[in-house]
Image (tube, rainbow, N blue to C red):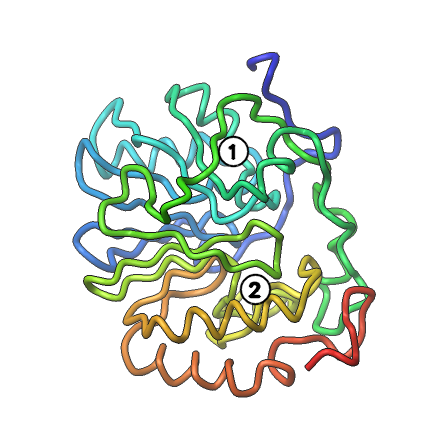
Amino acid sequence: MDQDMNYGEDYKFIPATSISSGAGMQLLPDVYCHTIQIVNIALVGEQEHFVLVDAGMPHSSDGIINIVEERFGDNAKPETIVLTHGHFDHVGAIIELVEHWDIPVYAHRLEIPYLTGRQRYPEPDSTVEGGMVAKMSPFFPNEPINLGDHVQPLPNDGTVPFMDGFNWVHTPGHTPGHVSFFRDEDGALIVGDAFVTVKQENLFDVMTQDKEISGPPRYLTTDWKAAKESVRKLSQLHPTIAVTGHGAPMVGEELTNNLNKLVREFDQIAKPDHGKYVDPDVH
C-alpha cells in the first residue's frame, strides 16, 4: 500500500448485508447500479470510457474489480473514481482500487480534509430513533482515510471529469462536501446519501431492502437544516431516475411522488425527534 495512502486505525470489515448484495441493475444504457452488502456503487459510461461512483464497503475491492471486468472485459479500468462523500461505506475499498488501477479520485473540496487524513467526521449519533443500525453506528469506522495527492477537488464549474453531460450538485447536510450527480438530458440522478430509499437505521429494513423513501441516514447526518435544503434542491431538478446510496433505485412517477412527499414532510419522515445533532428550533 502506498505510504501516502492509508485507512484509519478503526478500518475493519462490517458484517452487515442485505438480500440485494451482489445484485446489479442496468438503469440506462450507460448507468449501472450494483449493491455491495448494504451500499450501492454506480458505473457510468460505456466500454473504455466509464467512471466508478463511490467505492463500496471495507474489503470489497476484489468484488468491485470483478464487477468492472465482467461488464467491460479483462483488465478494464475506469477513468476515475468520483465520490459523493467520504463515509466508510462509500470509500471502503478505495485505496486498493486506486493502487490496482492507478487512477485519480475526485470529491468536493469540502470533503478533501476527510480524505487526506486531516479531519475526522463527527461521531455517529447512536441516540437517534430508528433501529438497530443506529445503535451499532459507534462501531463503524470513523477515522479519516488518507488518499494523499491521489484525490483532487471537483472542478468549480460544476462539471464532472469523464462524466459527459453530468454536473455535480452540492447537497450538504449528511456531510459538508456531499454531492449528487445530475444529467439534465435525461433526468438521471446519482444521489449518494442526500436521500435514500430504505430506512437505513432499521436493521430489518436494511436486510430486506424494503423500499421507502427517507432522508439521509440519521446516525451520520449532522446538519439537518442543510439536509432538508438539499432534498428540496434535488426535487427542483425533476429527476426521472434516482440511484441512491442505499436502497433500490426509483424511477418515473414513483420517484416524483415520493420525492415531493419527502420535501413536504421532511421533518416527519427524515429528521429524528431527538439526537445530539438535532436542533428542535430548526424546521
- Closer-to-camera residue (28/152): 152
What amino acid does circle 1 point to?
Answer: Ala
Q: Position of residue 86 (x, y in %)?
A: 57, 43
**SS type, badge 1:** loop
Q: Position of residue 259 (x, y in %)?
A: 43, 79
Looking at the image, the residue that sits furthest to the front is 157
Badge 1: residue crowd in 10 Å (few <14, some 14–19, many ≥20): many
Query: In this picture, is 29 found above or below 120?
Result: below
Disc 1 from disc 2: Cα separation: 21 Å
Badge 2: residue crowd in 10 Å (few <14, some 14–19, many ≥20): many
Q: Position of residue 19 (x, y in %)?
A: 47, 60
Q: Quadrant of the C terminus?
A: bottom right
Residue contact between numbered discs 1 and 2, judged by CB atoms under 8 Å? no
Disc assigned to residue 206: 2
- Closer-to-camera residue (33/239): 239
- Closer-to-camera residue (182/26): 182
What amino acid does circle 2 point to?
Answer: Val
Q: Mark 1 sits on what residue?
A: 93
* In this picture, residue 140 sits left or right of residue 151: right
- Closer-to-camera residue (130/186): 186
Query: In this picture, is 198 found above or below 109?
Result: below
